[in-house]
Image (tube, helix red, strand yellow):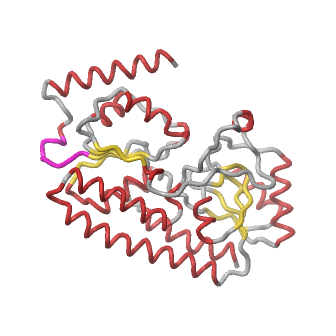
Amino acid sequence: MKRAYIFIALCIGIGSFAFANGTKDAPKANGAITVTATLFPFYDFTRAIAGDKINLALLLPPGAESHSFEPTPRDILTIQHSDVFIYNGGESDAWVDRILDSMDKRNMKVIRLMDAVDVVEEEIVEGMEEEEEAAETAEAAEYDEHIWTSPQNAALIVRAITDALCEKDKANADFYRRNADSYTVKLNELDAAFQTVVNNAKRKTIVFGDRFPFRYFADAYGLSYFAAFPGCSTETECSAATIAFLINKIRSENIPVVFHLELSNERIADAITAETGAKKRQLHAVHNVSKRDLDNGATYLELMTRNVDALREALQ
């Protein structure tokens, strides 16, 4: 680990030398500011706000697991050469603070988006498996990092990104604010669609044969939930006792759907559906997308709109 940080420091030093000698990344040539976002939802919000007025980079590769991401030397140089750097915060982004502490940030606007919303602690609900490491270090509160899963939070995030872009690029501030206003209207419509589903639902409980990164979403719409793991777990296999608990919950409450996440191996959900006859459906947390989805122009609004229909089926 120590050698890794020495390597990171060397990369930063080399990047600083190259920048000082006029070899900073080519996208600067068009005069637009350069913005880097660590996660797909923040990247997507930013491109909706800024369009072609900026040079925008997504740090997390398509299909990658955000909770175990480690930056490459190229990623570190991308961050260093950014006018605006957007990241989430929390335990999964511990590497960000170490890297930023080693950089000259006088000309960089840094946005930690967990500061833009009211965060809640990650919780262990009945039947859920807790990681051993988390249980051993339970003294410190661990906050749920999936802040964007609530459209209401997404609107606050869009406002924070817009303010940063306007501060860094005053010439295009009116453009950014107009786009942000239009996008927020769409987020409000999405929020209303979810609320309508919940208001007309027979039940208020959802089951995940997977991690549960929807705490903010569940809180926003008054939903209860059961899941194999908490949202930031890196586990993919759970005990027979956890699977049995989820099977019994579905049977006892006649729950028609068991959810899995995007980019999941789906094995836990498959085991539950095989025993219960419940339908397996995806509820997309939009923490990342596949390369195919990215190439096809997938958006937060599109993926979350699909979730409206999936939630309706689960709550019927």
* Position above or below: 158 against 134: below
Assess whether residue 147 is covered by the magenta stretch: no
The image shows residue 158 at horizontal and vertical percentages of 37, 61
**Image quarter of residue 205:** bottom right
**What residue is at 49 percent from the left and 39 percent from the top?**
93
Q: Nearer the viewer, residue 296 or 185?
A: 185
* Position above or below: 60 against 294: above
**What residue is at 17 percent from the left and 42 percent from the top?**
28
Relative side of 133 to 10, left or right: right
The image shows residue 96 at horizontal and vertical percentages of 43, 35
The image shows residue 122 at horizontal and vertical percentages of 65, 50
Residue at the farthest bottom position: 200
**What residue is at 44 percent from the left and 67 percent from the top?**
301
Relative side of 257 to 116, left or right: right
Q: Which of 182 and 262 is in front in this view?
A: 182
Q: Considering the image in quadrants, where does the C terminus appear?
A: bottom right
**What residue is at 23 percent from the left and 48 percent from the top?**
55
**Image quarter of residue 77:** top left
Residue segment shown in magenta? 27-34
